[in-house]
Amino acid sequence: MPKVVLVTGATSGVGRALCQRLLREEEELHLCLACRNPGRAEALRAELVAARPSAQVSTVQVDVSDLRSVLRAAGELRHRFRRLDYVYLNAGIMPSPHLDVKALVSSLFSRNVIHVFSTAEGLLTQEDRVTADGLQEVFATNVFGHFLLVRELEPLLGAGDSPRRLIWTSSRSARRANFRLEDVQHREGREPYSSSKYAVDLLSVALNRHGNGQGLFSSVVCPGTMLTNLTYGILPPFVWTLLMPFIWLMRFFANAFTLTPHNGAEALVWLFHQKPESLNPLTKYLSATTGLGSNYVTTEKMDLDENTAEQLYRHLLELERHVRATVRSAD
Ligand SMILES: NC(=O)C1=CN([C@@H]2O[C@H](COP(=O)(O)OP(=O)(O)OC[C@H]3O[C@@H](n4cnc5c(N)ncnc54)[C@H](OP(=O)(O)O)[C@@H]3O)[C@@H](O)[C@H]2O)C=CC1
Ligand SMILES: CC(C)=CCC[C@@H](C)[C@H]1CC[C@H]2C3=C(CC[C@]12C)[C@@]1(C)CCC(=O)C[C@@H]1CC3
């Protein structure tokens, strides 16, 4: 039986590289591309099948920031598949990022330079929006839409003869100081991206607590800093090109500059092969690249506690009840 793998945000960046690498490395696989843009999804499907004609690749349309779209897509997946072996919860956004150039320059002369360049701590703020469902867009996309998808896919992720896996694309920029249980959507702060990734880390811990007994295992990864549509929103491609000599030099000191989506996918592919029982739920798995360009996976203990994880989980369940009631009454 081929393993069934669902990937959100497969049309570009690390999601796309993950699909290419999995199909190149794995014989028996059914890859389902969960994408918001059907044209791009079909173009990717055709490209993957052209590269490997025996590959089984399908698509499903989903905008993870739109709750009705998530409910509809999950219904379609329940209809199409009897089980999902791996779900990569990878789609993510960072809207209208602002780089604090003064902080960037002063970090160059600080002892913290490697940490700051690996995590972007203090360097970036974003402007979030509110979705048609009334949620903060970064939270809806990076966290809640995916949470609802997982909840809706529970019948396909339940106990079976082999473990089921959730693999979240988080970030080294997830930071406890940017997250508050009283404001999980980050309505008030200026770092919704970091807050959303911290929420992802917490959520993964809670999902393990509630799912491991039924054979469901969750992990978080950071692909490192890559040049993708997301980072081209921070600096345009030509500026990244100008910075390249500096970045190549930085790579000898900061392994987080993976730069290409292929390199960034290292930890996502590595996790595919690991026995979930051997993984630590409190560890983040990081793609890393050496100065000479070799890829490897390293780990980081997450700065969180299980009590906060549980409280966030309950909060998300409550929000889920609320949005389901709203969707029902509007239909
Ligand atoms: N780039 C980096 O340096 C880092 C990225 N990450 C994380 O990696 C993940 C992938 O980002 P990356 O590859 O860099 O960025 P890209 O912008 O290249 O890819 C993002 C993907 O997510 C999809 N997407 C965005 N919003 C939605 C939505 N509402 N519904 C469905 N799909 C959506 C995009 O679809 P579409 O093609 O339609 O736009 C695209 O396929 C994100 O979670 C990001 O936070 C983490 C650390 C560093
Ligand atoms: C000289 C030089 C390398 C300049 C680039 C400065 C910044 C644009 C980068 C420094 C740290 C980077 C970083 C990210 C984006 C680009 C930087 C701010 C991320 C926020 C991208 C998305 C993530 O999930 C984490 C990354 C942390 C580091």
Image: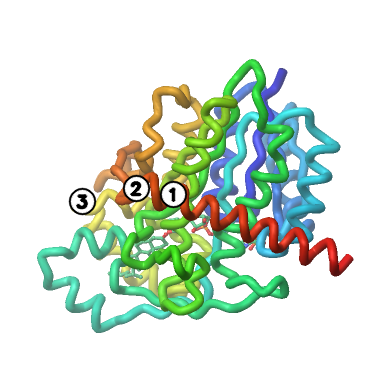
In the rendered view, does 145 fall on the left or right side of 41? left
The picture places residue 218, in percent across and down from the top left corner, at 50, 37
In the rendered view, does 237 fall on the left or right side of 57? left
Q: Nearer the viewer, residue 185 or 296?
A: 185
Find out if the beta carbon at label 3 lies less than 8 Å from the nearest ligand 2 atom.
no
Q: Secondary structure at mark 1?
A: helix
Amino acid type, mark 2? Asp
Q: Secondary structure at mark 2?
A: loop
Q: Nearer the viewer, residue 45 or 271?
A: 271
Amino acid type, mark 1? Ala
Q: Residue at x 33, y 50 (%)?
A: 304
Amino acid type, mark 3? Phe
In the rendered view, does 191 fall on the left or right side of 291? right
Q: Secondary structure at mark 3?
A: loop
The picture places residue 252, in percent across and down from the top left corner, at 20, 51
Residue 185 in sight = yes
Q: Which residue is mark 3?
A: 252
Q: Are marks 2 and 3 in contact (CB under 8 Å)?
A: no
The answer to which of marks 2 and 3 sits earlier in the sequence is 3
Q: Nearer the viewer, mark 3 or mark 1?
A: 1
In this rendering, the count of numbered labels is 3
The answer to which of marks 3 and 1 sits earlier in the sequence is 3
Q: Which residue is mark 1?
A: 309
Q: Are marks 2 and 1 in contact (CB under 8 Å)?
A: yes
In the rendered view, does 258 fall on the left or right side of 210? left
Q: Which residue is mark 2?
A: 305
Locate ligand 2 by image quadrant.
Answer: bottom left
Q: Nearer the viewer, mark 2 or mark 3?
A: 2
